[in-house]
Image: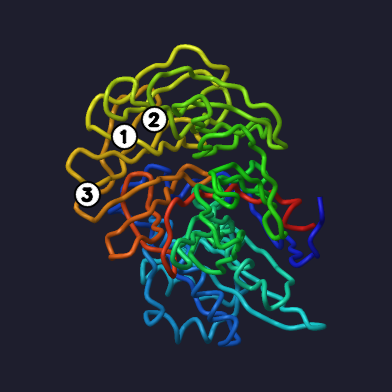
């Protein structure tokens, strides 16, 4: 695997035990009880303001925070430093800031040095202290990295602000290409540019590759592409339509639907291609398989009960358990990485909405309503957020929301469908 140049070095400045011992925000905190936090502009007024804005936007997108307006404290923040003895904690508590982010920017040998700190104003403690050394073009990643640290310190679980979302975008008549973007919608990057139809991207577990369907050779086949590199490798050659791929979390197989036998059934294949193994032998459509987090089962859509409903079966094949019994088209499932929920798109009144349920089909809840057509949910790697495509603004675009349906926010800067949330970057990947 080709390594990328080093771009971020960071050092822990201080990480008191209180940061890991105390949970400030429970994972199931109600959407109407947001945690008040102040994020002060950094000292230089240029990159520093940008970094603060990115962190504020990250925390807003999470749906867990109420960002205290900068106008409430800008003058005080400018007169303070970032050390504990220079901060007027009594002021920050008076404006009810339960957490405070402060930092500064400097430059050295063509690099930008960013120091960021998270404080508890009531305890007068620093919960997180980090210093990053990066090229200017990687400043957004620095800000996202610290937002992840804020989430870890306050909730006990790292954030997903440095992850990416893959999706399909219309780029011209009869053309759809695969793109990736940062989870906040910035930095869109083309994965394909073959002037064909490219659909349904799904990430490999390590986040380095995508598998997707392409009509490049006329018929829909599965291809694998390494993100950031040119080229794509065809891995199916079995005839029929080969669609809706899904990479197993253990990396060993890719499940997909194929009409090679005359009707769409579920198959698996290795990421390098070869002979596919058939798992279902239905006489009606089986489509859109999605793996469980342990790779031991998958959920899929099927017409075997009349209409399109969701079923669950072992990843080795065998008996299928029906999960949905309402609606007439339930499709596009996504299994939470936590294993506790399955999201899907369903419709019973003309347009699709996003629903969520337990893995046994119980406790179905509608997450979207009265807001256009909402399709193709995909969980973030921490299970707290869901991305989906919606037509509520006219043209389809990519949105994210909390897994309880709150804080629905558009993130894509242009059109987009079929979003798939990528995995969290491993520490070693970020420092290669």
Give the residue pinned by disc 1.
Answer: 330
Numbered disc 1: secondary structure: strand
Instruction: Decide which of 290, 11 is in the foreground and name it.
Output: 290
**Earlier sequence position, callout 2 versus callout 1:** 2
Expressed as whole percent of the image width and height from the top left, the position of residue 299 reads 45, 27
Residue 66 placement: quadrant: bottom left
Point 65% across, 51% down: residue: 425
Residue 354 placement: quadrant: top left
Q: Which mark is residue 369?
A: 3
Looking at the image, is 34 positioned above or below residue 332?
below
**Earlier sequence position, callout 2 versus callout 3:** 2
Number of residues whose C-alpha sits closer than 10 Å to that of mark 1, classed few (under 14), some (14–19) or many (20 or more) = many
- Left or right: 59, with 316 as reference point: left
Point 30% across, 24% down: residue: 362
Numbered disc 2: secondary structure: strand
Mark 2 to mark 1: distance in Å?
A: 7 Å
- Left or right: 386, with 279 as reference point: left
Residue 94 placement: quadrant: bottom left
Looking at the image, is 144 positioned above or below residue 135?
above
Give the residue pinned by disc 2.
Answer: 301
Point 65% across, 32% down: residue: 250
Mark 2 to mark 3: distance in Å?
A: 22 Å
């Amino acid at each position: 695997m080709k390594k990328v140049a080093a771009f971020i070095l960071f050092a822990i400045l201080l990480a008191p035990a209180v940061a890991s011992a105390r949970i400030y925000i429970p994972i199931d905190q109600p959407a109407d009880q947001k945690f008040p936090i102040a994020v002060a502009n950094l000292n230089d007024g240029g990159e520093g303001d940008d970094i603060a804005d990115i962190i504020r936007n990250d925390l807003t997108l999470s749906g867990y925070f109420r960002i205290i307006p900068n106008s409430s404290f800008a003058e005080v923040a400018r007169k303070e430093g970032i050390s504990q003895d220079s901060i007027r904690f009594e002021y920050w508590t008076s404006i009810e800031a339960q957490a405070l982010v402060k930092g500064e920017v400097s430059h050295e040998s063509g690099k930008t040095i960013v120091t960021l700190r998270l404080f508890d104003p009531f305890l007068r403690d620093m919960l997180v202290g980090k210093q990053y050394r990066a090229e200017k073009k990687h400043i957004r990643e620095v800000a996202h990295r610290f937002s992840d640290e804020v989430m870890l310190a306050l909730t006990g679980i790292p954030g997903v602000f440095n992850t990416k979302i893959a999706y399909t975008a219309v780029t011209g008549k009869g053309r759809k290409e695969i793109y990736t973007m940062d989870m906040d919608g910035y930095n869109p990057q083309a994965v394909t540019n073959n002037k064909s139809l490219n659909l349904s991207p799904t990430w490999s577990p390590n986040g380095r590759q995508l598998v997707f369907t392409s009509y490049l050779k006329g018929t829909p086949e599965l291809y694998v592409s390494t993100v950031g590199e040119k080229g794509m490798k065809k891995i199916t050659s079995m005839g029929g339509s080969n669609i809706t791929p899904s990479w197993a979390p253990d990396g060993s197989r890719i499940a997909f639907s194929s009409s090679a036998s005359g009707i769409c059934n579920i198959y698996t294949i290795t990421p390098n291609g070869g002979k596919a193994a058939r798992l279902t032998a239905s006489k009606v459509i089986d489509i859109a398989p999605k793996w469980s987090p342990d790779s031991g089962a998958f959920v899929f859509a099927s017409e075997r009960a009349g209409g399109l409903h969701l079923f669950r079966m072992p990843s080795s094949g065998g008996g299928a358990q029906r999960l949905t019994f309402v609606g007439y088209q339930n499709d596009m499932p996504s299994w939470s990485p936590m294993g506790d929920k399955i999201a899907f798109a369903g419709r019973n009144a003309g347009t699709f909405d996003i629903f969520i349920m337990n893995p046994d089909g119980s406790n179905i809840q509608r997450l979207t309503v009265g807001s256009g057509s909402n399709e193709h949910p995909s969980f973030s790697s921490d299970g707290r957020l869901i991305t989906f495509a919606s037509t509520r603004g006219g043209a389809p675009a990519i949105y994210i929301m909390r897994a309880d349906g709150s804080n629905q926010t558009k993130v894509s800067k242009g059109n987009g469908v079929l979003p798939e949330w990528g995995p969290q970057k491993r520490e070693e990947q970020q420092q290669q």
